[in-house]
Image: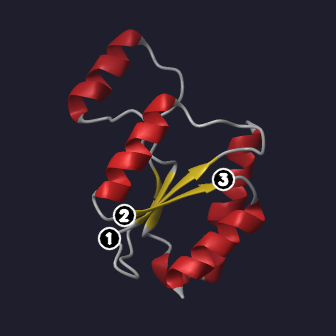
Amino acid sequence: MSEEDKLQSECVKWFRYQYPKMKQLLFHVPNGGKRSKVTAQIFKAMGVVPGVADLILLAPRKGYGALCIEMKTPSGDQSPSQKEWMKETTAAGNKYALCRSFDEFEKTIKDYLS
């Protein structure tokens, strides 16, 4: 498990403990990872979109339709497709956050849900 995966797992575990009634509304979109060419083609045909945020919270708040969270380690960079998806999703009325630590994730969630 990568450092980014560990961070994200810790954040999801905390969220589900803190917000048990909303635990089904925060989910990971398994877009990344290594796949065969055939599997990648199948997923693309099924609607996989490059750059989608790691976590999506389907809870409208403060005029936003949803909260989309990209998890990165302190030294991690967004890919061009992640930056493009961020631009498109915010233009569509969603909140987007880049979180590089548990503390950033916790603050993002609390600010969004307050």
Task: Left or right? Give the position of 26 relative to 4.
Answer: left
55 relative to 60, above or below: above
Q: How many C-alpha atoms fall within 10 Å of the one at disc 2: few (<14), some, or many (≥20)? A: many
Q: How many C-alpha atoms fall within 10 Å of the one at disc 1: few (<14), some, or many (≥20)? A: some
Measuring from the top left, give residue 77's x and y in whole percent: 65, 36
Give me the C-alpha separation between circle 2 and circle 1: 5 Å
Q: Residue at x 67, y 74 (%)?
A: 107
Of pointers 1 and 3, the one earlier in the residue sequence: 3
Residue found at the very far left of the displayed protein:
45
What amino acid is found at the position of numbered circle 3 in the picture? Gln
What amino acid is found at the position of numbered circle 2 in the picture? Asn
Q: Which residue is mark 3?
A: 8
Q: Residue at x 37, y 57 (%)?
A: 90
Give me the C-alpha separation between circle 2 and circle 3: 20 Å
Q: Which residue is mark 1?
A: 65
To which quarter of the image does residue 37 belong? top left
In the rendered image, is residue 14 in sight? no
Q: Residue at x 59, y 74 (%)?
A: 109
Q: Which residue is mark 2?
A: 94
Q: How many C-alpha atoms fall within 10 Å of the one at disc 3: few (<14), some, or many (≥20)? A: many
Q: Are marks 2 and 1 in contact (CB under 8 Å)?
A: yes
In the rendered image, is residue 20 in sight? yes
